[in-house]
Amino acid sequence: MLNLVEAKNNDRMISVLIIGGSRFVGRLVAQQLHQHPNIKLTLFNRGLTNPEIIEGINYIYGDRECDDIRQVYTQSWDVVIDMMGYYPDTIKDFISKINTKRYIFISSISVYDLFNPSKTIIGEQDTLLSECTVKERTDTTWATYGNRKVSCETEILKSGMAAIILRPSLIYGPFDPTDRLYYWWYRIKNKVPYLMPKSLIYPVTFTYAVDMASIIVQSVFIEKHRCIYNTVTHDVMPFYHFMDVAAGILKADNKVQIIDDALLIDKKLTEDDMPLWFKDECMVFKNQRLIEDFNLSFTPLKKSVEDSLSWYDKRDWQQPSAGMRIDTENIYLKELSK
C-alpha cells in the first residue's frame, strides 16, 4: 500500500479523484489540492456547473447514478474524495468496484438524532438516526436525508475499506449556493428590520467552507487517524452572534426583532421562509477528536465572515434565492408588532 505521507515527502505523484468538486466545498478542495505539485487530480461530475473551472487538471464527465460512473473504475486511485454520496445503494455499488487506497466520504451532522440527542453536545459516538428503509434508500426528499447518510456510512464501515468519514455541520463561505446564511446577512446589508425566531438565540456550531476544504485535503495525507470526525470549525455560539459580527463588518445596525417561535408558527411560517430555523433541534457538536488527530488552524470567526461577505460583494448582493422576500417579511413585521 502506498504511504501517502511518504509519497508527499518524496515528491511521488498521488492520484486523487473527486466525485463532484465544481460547486462549493468540492471546488475549494480542488483548488487547494491543485496547489500541491505531486497531486494528479481528476474531477468526476456532470459538467453542468462550472465545467473545467480549474485549468490543468483532468475531467471525467458523467452522472454517478448511471453507467457513466464506470469510467472511474478503469484505473486505480490513491485517494477518492466523495462529495456527492446520498444514496446507500449507489455507495455500496461504488465502493465494491472502485480501486482506491483511501476513501474520504463527506457525510453530515444530519446523521445524528438532533431532536432527541443523547447529550447536549454531540460527539461521534452519540445516537444516530435509524437507517433508512428499503423504500427510503432511493428517496430524494430532505425528510430522509439523514437516514440515507446513516445507511451510506454503514455500507462504508461494513466494506472494511480504508476510509475517513467527515461530518460537517452547517457549512457557509465563498461559493455557497444555498443562500441560507446569506438570507440573514442580506437584511443587515440593506439595513432593514427583520424577524428572527427566538429559538435562534440558542447555541450552534458552524463549519467554515475553506477550513472544511483544508480538513479534506489533510485527510488525503494524514497517516494516523480514526474513521469518523465531526468537522465543525467554530466555537459554540448563538446563531444571532453571526448577525452581530456581520453588522460590525458592514457598519450597519443589526435591526433584528426576535419573535417567539409559536407566534411565527401561527402565521404559518416555516424554515422555507426563514432558512436555518432549527426549532427543537440540537445543533452543538464536539470536534475534540478532529483537533487531536489533525494539524489545524481554524480561520477566526471575523475573518471567515469578512471573506464570505467579500464574496457576496462580488455578486452585487443579489436577491437571496432562499427564504421570503423583504416585502413579504414587512407584512409579518407589521402584524407581529401590533
Image (cartoon, rainbow, N blue to C red):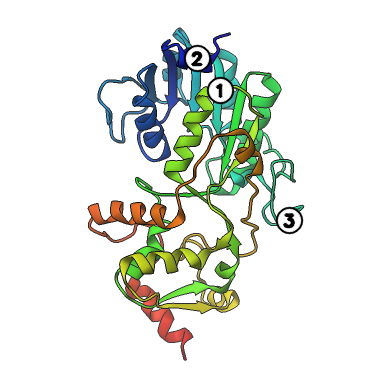
Ranked by sequence position, the earlier of labels 1 and 3 is 1
* Contact between labelled residues 3 and 2, with CB atoms less than 8 Å apart: no
* Contact between labelled residues 2 and 1, with CB atoms less than 8 Å apart: no
Query: Helix, strand, or loop for circle 3?
Result: loop
Q: Nearer the viewer, mark 1 or mark 3?
A: 1
Residue 116 numbered tag: 3
- Residue at 63% over, 24% down: 224
- Residue at 26% over, 59% down: 318
Q: Residues within 10 Å of mark 3 (few under 14, many from 20)?
A: some
Q: Residue 317 occupies which quadrant of the picture?
A: bottom left
Residue that mark 2 sits on: 78
| Amino acid type of the residue tagged 2 in the rendering | Asp
Query: Helix, strand, or loop for circle 1?
Result: strand
Ranked by sequence position, the earlier of labels 2 and 3 is 2
Residue that mark 1 sits on: 103
**In the depicted structure, whether residue 91 falls above or below residue 24:** above
Label 1, label 3: how far apart the Cα atoms are: 30 Å
Residue 155 position, x and y percent, is: 66, 26
Query: Helix, strand, or loop for circle 2?
Result: strand
